[in-house]
């Protein structure tokens, strides 16, 4: 007998590993689109090819999933004092770290020229990801596909 979870007044089944994988892939593609848009709009971000775009999005997504929570907790006082604006600098640092990690692989053609390029790129990636996620809704799509 399946277990059910009550969320927001509605009952639903817990996410299966299959639906979690589908949601991850959708979020990955959203991040890839956002990285591509940032590379097109910011002159100091250089990105070549769809393979590089997907690999950069994967690296950035993994950093956001595993390192960002630690950075948020570690900088919590700064986040409170700046009313959350410090998150922009955390995102900038993660994008710069993504460029550094990408530079270690010959197959990935991605680089960032300066702090300001990383800063504006991080802002654009955040905005584009937010708006695409409003339309696409990875969790909802994943749940509907696993039924």
Image: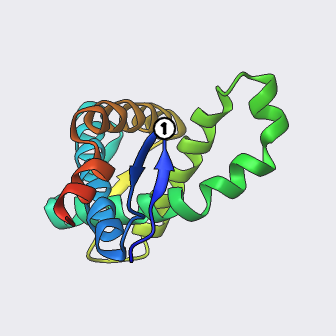
Quarter in which the N terminus is drawn: bottom left
Of residues 144 and 119, the one nearer the viewer is 144
36 lies left or right of 61? left
Coloration mode: rainbow
Please give left or right for residue 119 compared with residue 58 in the image: right
In which image quadrant can residue 2 be found?
bottom left
Which residue, given by chain and number where applicable, does mark 1 sit on?
8
- For the point 26% across and 52% down, the residue is 32
Picture residue at 43% right of the left edge, 58% below the top? 60
Q: Position of residue 143 (x, y in %)?
A: 27, 58
Q: Is residue 116 left or right of residue 31?
A: right
Determine whether, in the image, residue 71 is placed left or right of residue 4: right
Q: Where 73 sits versus 1, above or below? A: above
Farthest right residue in view = 77
Extreme residue toward the front, this view: 1
Query: Could you tell me which secondary element the residue under label 1 belongs to?
Result: loop
User: Is residue 144 something one can see in this rendering?
Assistant: yes
Q: Is residue 4 above or below residue 77?
A: below
In which quadrant of the rendered image does the C terminus lie?
A: bottom left
One can see residue 95 in this view: no
Numbered marks: total: 1
Q: Residue at x 17, y 61 (%)?
A: 145
At which x and y percent is residue 10?
41, 42
Residue 34 position in % (x across, y down): 28, 42
Q: Quadrant of residue 105?
A: bottom left
Viewer-proximal residue, 8 or 125?
8
| Residue 86 lies in quadrant | top right
- Above/below status of 143 relative to 127: below
Mark 1 crowdedness (10 Å alpha carbons): few <14, some 14-19, many ≥20: few
Q: Horizontal and vertical percent for residue 93?
A: 58, 48
Q: Residue at x 50, y 34 (%)?
A: 119
């Amino acid at each position: 007998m399946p277990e059910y979870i009550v969320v927001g007044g509605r009952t639903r089944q817990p996410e299966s590993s299959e639906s979690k994988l589908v949601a991850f892939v959708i979020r990955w593609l959203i991040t890839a689109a956002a990285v591509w848009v940032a590379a097109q709009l910011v002159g100091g971000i250089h990105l070549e090819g769809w393979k590089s775009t997907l690999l950069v999005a994967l690296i950035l997504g993994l950093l956001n999933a595993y390192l960002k929570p630690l950075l948020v907790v570690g900088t919590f006082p700064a986040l409170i004092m700046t009313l959350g604006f410090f998150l922009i600098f955390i995102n900038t640092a993660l994008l710069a770290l993504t460029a550094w990690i990408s530079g270690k692989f010959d197959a990935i053609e991605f680089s960032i020229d300066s702090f300001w390029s990383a800063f504006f790129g991080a802002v654009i990636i955040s905005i584009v990801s937010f708006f695409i996620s409003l339309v696409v809704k990875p969790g909802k799509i994943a749940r509907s596909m696993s039924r």
